[in-house]
Image (tube, rainbow, N blue to C red):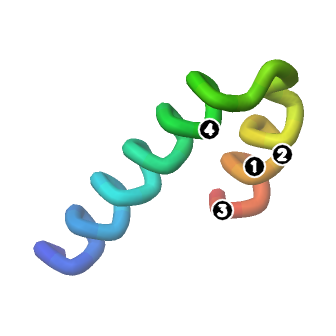
Amino acid sequence: VSQLRKIKKVWGESVYCGLVHEKTPLKVKNFGIWLR
C-alpha cells in the first residue's frame, strides 16, 4: 500500500509539473486517463 501511495504522489507531482509547463493540458489529461 505504501508503494502505491508513493507512486500516486510521484504521479500527482509529475501531472502538476506537466500542467504548469505544458501550454496544452490535453497531453496531461490523456496521460492521466492512460494511467487509470
**Mark 3 and mark 1: span between their CA atoms?**
5 Å
Percent coordinates x, y for residue 36 in the rendering = 64, 58
Horizontal side of residue 4 vs 24, given as left or right: left
Is residue 20 placed above or below 7 in the rendered structure? Answer: above
- Circles 3 and 1 in contact, beta carbons < 8 Å: yes
Front tag of 2 and 4? 4
Q: Earlier in the sequence, mark 1 or mark 4?
A: 4
Residue 11: quarter of image: bottom left
Residue placed under numbered mark 4 in the picture: 18
Q: Earlier in the sequence, mark 4 or mark 3?
A: 4
Question: Label 2 neighbourhood size at 10 Å, few (<14), some (14-19), many (20+)?
Answer: few
Residue placed under numbered mark 2 in the picture: 30
- Circles 1 and 4 in contact, beta carbons < 8 Å: no
Amino acid type, mark 1: Ile
Residue placed under numbered mark 3 in the picture: 35
Percent coordinates x, y for residue 33 in the rendering = 75, 49
Horizontal side of residue 36 vs 13, given as left or right: right
Front tag of 4 and 3? 4
- Circles 2 and 4 in contact, beta carbons < 8 Å: no
Question: Label 1 neighbourhood size at 10 Å, few (<14), some (14-19), many (20+)?
Answer: few
Is residue 22 placed above or below 15 in the rendered structure? Answer: above
Amino acid type, mark 4: Gly
Amino acid type, mark 3: Leu
**Mark 1 and mark 4: span between their CA atoms?**
14 Å
Q: Residue at x 68, y 47 (%)?
A: 32
Find numbered disc 1 in the image and state the secondary structure of the residue it sits on.
helix
Q: In the drawing, what numbered circle is on residue 33? A: 1
